[in-house]
Image (cartoon, grey):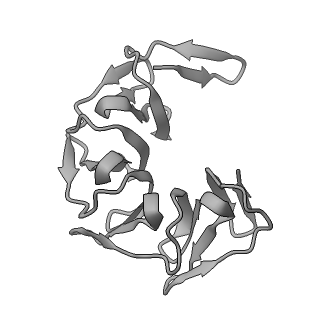
Amino acid sequence: GTIIKWNGCVWSRQASGTAEYLSDVWGLNATNVWAVGNKGTMLKWDGTSWTPQMSGTGTMLLGIYGNSATSIWAVGWAGTIVRWDGTRWSPQASSTTRDLNAVWASDDNNAWAVGTGGEVRKWNGTFWSSQAIPSTTSSLQAIIGLSVIDFYVSGDGGEVWRWNGTGYVKETIGTLNSIADLHVRDANNIWLV
């Protein structure tokens, strides 16, 4: 349940109220930050303290991302997807049993979740469906982007794929090391780790 926050001067440990492992954190602003983890653990920061939330699942949650205060997604083991609508978390039908490691959304009608075995699921505003990357069975670890027609997916074996609006294009990055996470600031500033 470790949470550490930077306040502009120092790092300080936050009281999370849980001993469960936390795997990801996402924030819309200074008073709307979410953390997810083991056994469906879901915590919300309101600017003052962390409070537990009912996630709608007891499954390990691995990733969280949102595009507004009323559209936040969390993903995890065995195809688990839950969505925050501004009031509550609700389980979603992912149509997969593969672990989902990360999620990213460009808007309310376009979200993607990636996971083991090259799994890519796409939300179209109504339901989740497969949007397979050709020729990969790698475990996909991260996804982030600039828009609905420009985002990146990374994974094991140095695999990085770019969605260009019509298909996935494999990027040559010069390593076979697994890419656990990525950050896109703009079209000329993209970092992989």
Decide: is 164 above or below 74. Answer: below
At x 45%, y 20%, the residue is 1
Side (left or right) of 70 relative to 167: left
Decide: is 6 above or below 13. Answer: below
Residue, far right: 174
Q: Position of residue 53 (x, y in %)?
A: 27, 28
Side (left or right) of 29 relative to 126: right
Decide: is 71 above or below 169. Answer: above
At x 48%, y 76%, the residue is 133
Q: Position of residue 23 (x, y in %)?
A: 48, 35
Q: Position of residue 119 (x, y in %)?
A: 41, 65
Choose between 49 and 1: the one closer to the eye: 1
Q: Is residue 190 visible?
A: yes
Residue, far bottom: 166
Q: Is residue 70 visible?
A: no
Q: Quadrant of residue 94?
A: bottom left
At x 19%, y 46%, the residue is 90
Q: How many marks?
A: 0
Q: Quadrant of residue 110?
A: bottom left
Q: Position of residue 158 (x, y in %)?
A: 68, 62
Choose between 187 and 102: the one closer to the eye: 102
